[in-house]
Image (tube, rainbow, N blue to C red):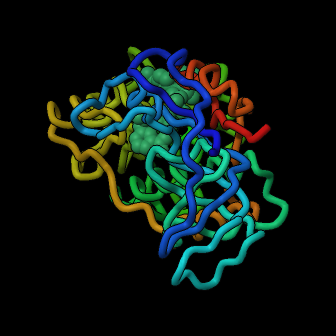
Amino acid sequence: MSKAVAFSRYGGPEVLETVEIEEPHAGPGELRVRVRAAGVQPFDTAVRRGDVKGYVEVSFPQTVGNEFAGVVDEVGEGVTGWEAGAEVIAFTSMNACGEVVTVSDQNVVAKPPGMPWEHAGVLSVCGQTAHIALSALKVGAGDTVLIHGAAGGVGTMAVQLAREWGAAVVGTASERNHDYLRDLGAVPVAYGPGLVDRVRELAPQGVDAALDAAGRDAIAPSLELVEDRGRVGTIGDYVGSRQHGVAMLGGTRTAARLAELTQLYADGKLRIHVQRAYPFAEAALAHREVETGHVRGKVVLVAD
Ligand SMILES: NC(=O)c1ccc[n+]([C@@H]2O[C@H](COP(=O)([O-])OP(=O)(O)OC[C@H]3O[C@@H](n4cnc5c(N)ncnc54)[C@H](OP(=O)(O)O)[C@@H]3O)[C@@H](O)[C@H]2O)c1
């Protein structure tokens, strides 16, 4: 048997528990990884609450987590290029927070030597989400981009990627995160009433594209600021995207995309901020913290 964080009914963070499941083994095309760290996303909490019932299939006890890092301990049939002992970063679907997990060899890249587990465990999904979203908005050199929710998990990645790709960034956050955003390379601005005027003042050259990485109250002001509505998109506001006819930005996560992000990290061009690490046994506290909606960077679960 093997341990995993799971829930057996929908509800608050308290429904999360450590359960014993049948020990997984690497099937054809898979690796088994002994997990050292796994990121927590708002998506995990939404599935756990039952908010996405009907869209996301669950099977109780339902395990959680989409991004993790750890050490390969079994190599499945047909897999080449990986050996037991390899340190990897990976992405999966609601199956990251276990003692050992199996994953497709297509979803795995090598962890750079020296990258702390806490960082490796939180890069896969928010990094790729930011990369996919900025690519869809065609962000590049000379652009000025407005990033809503710039201090969060995705926002932190998006600010740095946009800067790396040659864009100027205005990022929304509450006052306490403004120095953090400056440090990442963004011009900070407070969200809330008056946002459009404040952004116009900070970016008199105009705003070319806007990414809603906050998931709330961001599309309408973006449309006032960006001329081309094809360059406004959201990753979290399903209702707003339909209401305003702007894109829900999504795409395929790939090892190639993750490898690009990992290389940027290794080159010192992409920083990761972990607000807090919890042991797996305290996953409920980690979910509670993410559900505040005010995490700076990421919350991570680490193996005991
Ligand atoms: N994580 C992913 O990979 C992923 C993938 C697809 C979609 N999404 C969706 O994208 C959204 C962001 O995800 P995330 O993981 O980055 O979330 P997160 O880390 O939990 O976001 C927290 C951040 O949101 C900021 N924030 C809160 N209210 C805000 C507002 N009204 N305007 C601007 N910023 C605000 C907070 O800044 P202050 O503390 O300064 O208020 C905080 O830094 C969510 O809706 C999520 O479901 C995420």
Q: Is residue 72 above or below residue 61?
A: below
The quadrant in which the N terminus is found is top right
x and y percent of residue 189 in the render? 53, 28
Image position, residue 187 (x, y; %):
58, 38
Closer to the camera in the image, 74 or 119? 74
Left or right of 40: which side holds 183?
right
Q: In this view of the protein, can residue 281 be seen by the observer?
A: yes
- 291 shown above or below 54: above
In the picture, measured across the screen, residue 251 lies left or right of residue 301, that is left
Q: Is residue 257 visible?
A: no
Residue 215 drawn at (x, y percent): 37, 31
Rendered view: 103 above or below 195: below
Q: Where, by quadrant of the figure, is residue 148 drawn?
A: top left
Q: Residue at x 67, y 46 (%)?
A: 99
In the displayed structure image, the side of residue 116 where residue 156 appears, left or right: left
Q: Position of residue 81 (x, y in %)?
A: 63, 83
Given residues 5 and 146, the one toward you in this image is 5
Picture quarter with the C terminus: top right
The residue at 65%/59% (across/down) is 33
